[in-house]
Every structure is written in structure tokens, then in C-alpha cells.
Image (cartoon, helix red, strand yellow):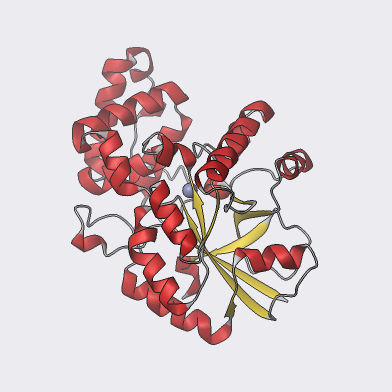
Amino acid sequence: MELAVIMYHYVRDAERTPFPRIHALPVGKFERHLDRLGEKYAFVGAGDVLAAVRGEARLPEHACLLTFDDGLKDHARNVFPVLRDRGIRGAFFVITSAVEEARVIDVHKVHFLLARLGTERMIEAFHDFISIHSPRLAGLSELRIDDRQRLSPSRYDDILTGNLKARLNTLDAPTKTAFLEKLFRDTLGDEAEFAKELYLSWDDVNTMIRGGMDFGSHTHSHRHIDTLSPKELGSEIATARDLLKEHTRGAALPIISYPFGTGDYSAALLDQLVGFGYALGFTVEVGVNTNLDQPLRLKRLNANDVL
Ligand SMILES: [Zn+2]
């Protein structure tokens, strides 16, 4: 068997939006992906994979599951109509705090700030913030961001942008949050308004479910799993599961996509997930699955890797 799981994030014609520099897959290109994938694979839904894991059904020899992370409004506007017309069941993973509390997740704040300001202006803002907010840190030369040395192995970012992201990730959480919240407010305005435009609402989720789509968890607040204590992790998973269950009247599936795809996927973590009822887990480990022996550790292909 072969199960190719494809991972998508932003699907939009970015140049027609207020953020033309957001790295997004254009809708026409998404449709061409589906044409090409359809030549080789039979599209399956997450429910088919669950049934195969439970031994109740078999997958086609060359199966393909489409997954969409982050619960973006793009998915209701640009993905859902295309999939519904083609009779394909996509699997969508929402960040429940983004929907429930109208929060813009840190990683998305960075995307939209970079798209609006550009890397150099964002780095200037970072240096200014540090010198005012934490003069103690400002003297530390290792917090300066430049492009002399690559700090992150990112395949998608230039050196300077990669280094900015790497620096932000080394900050303590309160400092990072304070910086991003202030710069976001100053640059892009009210976070809650922005969140409503960026993410699916529960109404969107239910419309898509009625239209044949499947929903699962991308945790409550999209934190790196491997930085959390077992108790914090439990709360991230349980809160998301309970909100999804409540707002979809039980239609959400026991499937999870790990934020950033990170985590050591230790036996303890996997046991914890099973304890919460999860049966399928999606990583960002690159590859096509040739068996279902580790259903909580499924590999995926990035949309960019497909064609
Ligand atoms: Zn994500």
C-alpha cells in the first residue's frame, strides 16, 4: 500500500489580497495539484484511513489524503468549493484558541508582519523593542540579527528572515508575546478583528462538515509540543478536543495534526494521545506512508514537494 498525505496551509491568490507577499498556494495551482494527484492516486478521506487502521476496510493501492492545517478562512473560501465539486473529502485541522478566543497565533503574526513590513523593518522594530523593553538584553550582541551566519536550516526563508525567526524562538515566551502583540497592534490593528478574517468560524466548520469535509485538532494554542510538560500538553489536547466536540456536536474525528510537526513522538506522548482518544496523528516528517503500523506518526508531503 501507499498512502500519500499532502499538507496545505494558505491557499489564496495573495496578490488580490491586502497581503500580496504572503507565501500562499494560488487557487489555480491548487486545482492543478488535484488534477496531477488524481492521475496517480485515489483520494480517500480521514474516515477511510481510520477504518483501515481499525482493520474494517482496505485503502486503495495508491491512496492520497489531503490535509489542511491551521483552520484558515482560505479553506472555506478557496478549498472547500473545489473539493466539494470534485467529491474529495479533505481533512482540516483547527487551532481552537484562534476560533474560540479570536487570537492570532504567533507564527501567523510573524507571517503577516513580514508580509507588511518586510524583514529589515521587522528586525529594526525588534532591536528597538528589545532596547526599550529589556535594556538588560539589549547589550547582548547575540540578540542582534544579521545575515553573517545562518541560524536556522529553513528551506523556505532567506538567511535574514530565517535568522529573525530563529531569534524570536530563542526569546522567553513573555518577551516574544509582548513584542509580537505590540508590533501587530501598531502595524495591523485589532487582533480579534484580524483573527475573524483569518480563521474559520464554527459556522464555517459546520458548513464544511455538512458539505462532506472532516475536522480534527491542531491543538488549542499551537505551541511546540516538545516544550510542554505532560500536564500542559494534556490541557492543550483536551481543551481542543472538547471544544471541537462541543461545536461540531460530536462530528469531529479523533485525528490530530501536530503544530510545527515537532515532538519526539515518544511512547509517553503517543500513550497520552491514545488516552485522549486520538487514532491518527500527522507529522511533518517527509515521505509517503507504506504501512499504517504507526497511525499516530503519519508522514506527509508539503504541497511544494508534490509538483
Ligand atoms: Zn500549524
Q: Is residue 254 left or right of residue 304?
A: right
Farthest residue toward the front? 249
Tally of marks: 0
Q: Residue at the spot x=77%, y=42% of the render? A: 271
* Picture coordinates of residue 254, whole percent (x, y): 65, 51
Please tell me in which quadrant of the rendered image residue 294 appears: bottom right
Q: Residue at the spot x=64%, y=43% of the render? A: 263
* Picture coordinates of residue 109, whole percent (x, y): 34, 40
Please tell me in which quadrant of the rendered image residue 286 appears: bottom right
Q: Is residue 99 left or right of residue 265?
A: left
* Picture coordinates of residue 2, whole percent (x, y): 68, 75
Is residue 286 at all visible to an observer of this figure? no
Q: Residue at the spot x=19%, y=53% of the render? A: 18
Tell which of 183 and 270 is nearer to you: 270
Which quarter shows the N terminus?
A: bottom right
Tell which of 307 and 74 is nearer to you: 74
Is residue 302 at all visible to an observer of this figure? yes
In the image, is residue 130 above or below residue 165? above
* Picture coordinates of residue 25, whole percent (x, y): 36, 65
Q: Residue at the spot x=43%, y=22% of the render? A: 174
In the image, is residue 119 above or below residue 293? above
Q: Is residue 117 left or right of residue 215?
A: left
Farthest residue toward the bottom? 39
